[in-house]
Amino acid sequence: MITESDELSASLDKAAGLWPDCKSRTELLRLLIEEGSKALLLKADNVKSQRMATLQSLQKIGTALWPADFDEQRKSEWQE
């Protein structure tokens, strides 16, 4: 059971204009939930892609901070 707030009521009214064949507000609500779910999944995929791109950029930056043989140099300092 969902209480129809003013915001939800306005959304259902707009949805009725998009889907005039719907016979009930319950059916409109189902369609709104489905469309919202699709939008949420798409947004989540976009956020994930952006985060992965950022991590890859940081990884590239991080590899240039130290010379390629940094680990060997560091180890040799401890052996002397």
Image: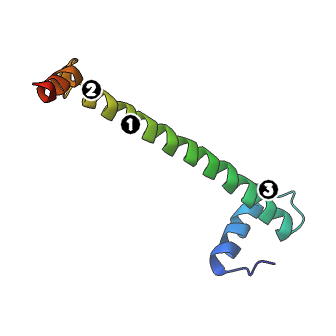
Occupied quadrant, residue 18? bottom right
Instruction: Give the residue displayed 30% in from the left and 27% down from the top.
Output: 60
Q: How many other residues sit within 10 Å of disc 1, few (<14), some (14-19) or many (≥20)? A: few
Of the image marks 3 and 2, the number of the one nearer the N terminus: 3
Instruction: Give the residue displayed 38% in from the left and 31% down from the top.
Output: 56
| Front-lying residue, 6 or 75 | 75
Figure check: 76 above or below 1:
above
Residue of label 1 = 55
Q: Secondary structure at mark 1?
A: helix
Q: Residue furthest left?
A: 80
Residue of label 2 = 63
Disc assigned to residue 78: none
Q: Secondary structure at mark 3?
A: loop
| Front-lying residue, 19 or 60 | 60
Q: Secondary structure at mark 2?
A: helix
Q: How many other residues sit within 10 Å of disc 2, few (<14), some (14-19) or many (≥20)? A: few
Q: Residue furthest front?
A: 80
Q: Residue furthest right?
A: 23
Quote the CA–CA distance across marks 2 and 1: 12 Å
Residue 79: image location, x then y, percent: 15, 25
| Residue type marked 3 | Trp
Q: How many other residues sit within 10 Å of disc 3, few (<14), some (14-19) or many (≥20)? A: few
Camera-side mark, 3 or 1: 1
| Residue type marked 2 | Thr
Instruction: Give the residue displayed 63% in from the left and 75% down from the top.
Output: 7
Residue of label 3 = 19
Q: Is residue 28 toward the left or the right of residue 11 in the image?
A: right
| Residue type marked 1 | Leu
Residue 12: image location, x then y, percent: 73, 68
| Front-lying residue, 38 or 29 | 38
Instruction: Give the residue displayed 23% in from the left and 24% down from the top.
Output: 71
